[in-house]
């Protein structure tokens, strides 16, 4: 899976993502399209992306995934890994998913827009994501016409995505900001700079595990390169501030911080029942401990892998657990096994 | 130290103790005695116990400890190990302590009474304690006259000790009673049976680490053997009930109990800051875990040793710590080291 690796600035930036929203010219948006039109979009996009011959995307090893043949919990599981949006779980439209062999590229068909091209990378790699997304975008445009307006740019179902159709984001771990009480200040200033801050799983998950998504708010009236450059600049600053805050925290309250981190370590390595929320909270402590070299026997990659493998639907999918309690037991097992 | 061993029924009974209160005939009780009289008592008792020759107590390897030459924290430390009563810490009288080589026998001179003969054993060994105490008592009586009334029996400073002057007690670990909510019921019925229940360090420490002292209330109007036999009988019942309650607890709520125990295990093995109260609470979980074979790599002896070595004055004495915070740090270290 794409998130199992340790990327650039991986002590703070877990992953980067770029998403382009596109729609085909002359076909209603998925919400308004009838089944036949949805089917047409699905076929056209599959053709443009997967047809052999002169396919510049061959190296991505793209494959079509038939979501209609998957159980809800299986779709929930890949949504937890950010491969599809939660909206894609419903089977009320002819939806499609095209996934790259390394799962870094996922292209949703008939989500809110006809096409959502999403590229993810571990670490701080917005440019790399943007390059891959552009490449896919260009390839599609060779065979299909996009809905495009010379004044507005790309047209999208929701006007907040119109223009560039570009949403770039990073997933960052900010225990330094949170534990020093400086997070709200950061969120406010990011907002003033035109960026949005959300939790790891969107709006409702704010603060869970001290992991946050930072993304651009504006898509209209700006150049694509300006969006990514601006995000790169601001996130670079957040990264170095976060590192400084962690050092400060450790310097000012060494034993208390070590105690907090080592208790979480001991609990994760021994607890029998582990809820998802508690796991996220304690894994945040471990991640901080690894970055401050308080914990030396655990790698970031292991933490990244654990973080996703213990999410509810992933546990259901992999272990066929019957209820929340058996998931909490299994979660405890998984963590103990991986942390050994 | 006497408590570092694992004795009979040591899964429930940490230790047993018998104490005889005695006073010399014709000398005022220590409270009323002047310094010269206190000195006289001290000399007489030392002589009776330590003079060579036909001394039947030779095997006990008794030695006089000069409390007046000890710092308060040193006296506090031996009080924590139950070798002296807290009252003995004050230097306001000519007090003395005679201790056996294995620290199982401690004889206080000029405490509340002229003589407090105390015998301790690890595990459930009231009879053994009583035999040793009797032997010492008999030996003293060979050379000294006790204050004795043919109606009242032995006379003591506080009337609650008069008669036999005998207090027999066991230190028991009762997590089964406490966690199933049956402890208050037990305490009430023990009280009806003429027994007193207190915490590990007397009145103020009730419930700390689920460790309790059970002792006889009455000393007057009963035979010494009746006191010890009765205590033996009742404690035997408490021991088997406690074991049954632990099994029941484990059977009814297996995972929750394992989780509680393993979390305490993980925390004790990793925490950096550890208060005395938290340590007692978590050690109780470990002790329960060992008895249910949930924890297999720790011995009762280790737990017994840890329990006493992490008490505040013991830490001050052994590590010369300056304040409460440095003691909490040292306590964390000691536990981690011993539990490895």
Image (cartoon, coloured by chain):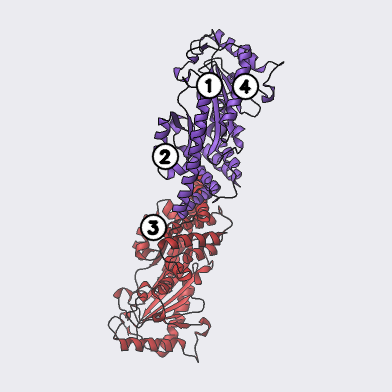
Chain colours: A purple, B red
Residue matched to label 1: A88
Q: CA distance from mark 4 to mark 2?
A: 36 Å
Residue matched to label 3: B186
Q: CA distance from mark 1 to mark 2?
A: 32 Å
User: Of B282 and B27, which appears nearest the observer?
Assistant: B282
Q: CA distance from mark 3 to mark 4?
A: 76 Å
Disc 4 on helix, strand or loop?
A: helix
Callout 3 and callout 2 share a chain: no
Q: CA distance from mark 1 to mark 3?
A: 60 Å
Label 4 or label 1, whichever comes before in sequence order = 1
Q: Residues within 10 Å of mark 2 (few under 14, many from 20)?
A: some
- Residue A69 in view, yes or no: no
Q: Is residue B241 left or right of residue B190?
A: right
Residue matched to label 2: A183
- Whether tag 3 and tag 2 are in contact, CB under 8 A, the answer is no
Q: CA distance from mark 4 to mark 1?
A: 24 Å
Disc 3 on helix, strand or loop?
A: helix
* Residue at the outermost right position: A53
- Whether tag 4 and tag 1 are in contact, CB under 8 A, the answer is no
């Amino acid at each position: 899976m794409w998130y199992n690796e340790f990327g650039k600035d991986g002590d703070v930036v877990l992953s980067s993502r770029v998403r382009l929203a596109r729609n085909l010219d002359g076909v209603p948006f998925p919400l308004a399209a009838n089944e036949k039109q949805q089917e047409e979009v699905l076929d056209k996009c599959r053709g443009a992306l997967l047809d052999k011959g002169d396919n510049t995307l061959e190296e991505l090893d793209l494959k079509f995934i038939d979501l209609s043949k998957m159980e809800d919990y299986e779709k929930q599981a890949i949504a937890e890994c950010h491969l599809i949006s939660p909206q894609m779980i419903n089977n009320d439209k002819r939806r499609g998913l095209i996934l790259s062999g390394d799962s870094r590229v996922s292209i949703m068909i008939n989500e809110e827009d006809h096409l959502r091209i999403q590229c993810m990378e571990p670490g701080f790699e917005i440019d790399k994501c943007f390059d891959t997304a552009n490449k896919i975008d260009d390839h599609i445009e060779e065979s299909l016409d996009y809905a495009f307006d010379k004044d507005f740019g790309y047209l999208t179902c929701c006007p907040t995505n119109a223009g560039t159709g570009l949403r770039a984001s990073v997933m960052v771990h900010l225990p330094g900001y949170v534990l020093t009480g400086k997070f709200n200040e950061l969120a406010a200033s990011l907002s003033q700079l035109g960026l949005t801050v959300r939790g790891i799983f969107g709006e409702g998950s704010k603060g869970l595990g001290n992991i946050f998504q930072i993304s651009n708010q504006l898509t209209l009236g700006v150049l694509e390169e300006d969006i990514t450059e601006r995000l790169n600049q601001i996130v670079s600053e957040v990264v170095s501030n976060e590192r400084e805050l962690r050092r400060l925290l450790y310097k000012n309250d060494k034993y208390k911080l070590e105690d907090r981190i080592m208790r979480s370590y001991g609990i994760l390595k021994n607890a029998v029942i582990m809820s998802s929320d508690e796991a996220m909270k304690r894994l945040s402590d471990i991640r901080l401990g690894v970055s401050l070299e308080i914990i030396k026997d655990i790698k970031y990659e292991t933490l990244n892998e654990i973080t996703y493998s213990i999410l509810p639907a992933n546990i259901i999918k992999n272990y066929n657990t019957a209820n929340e309690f058996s998931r909490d037991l299994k979660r405890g097992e998984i963590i103990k096994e991986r942390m050994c």
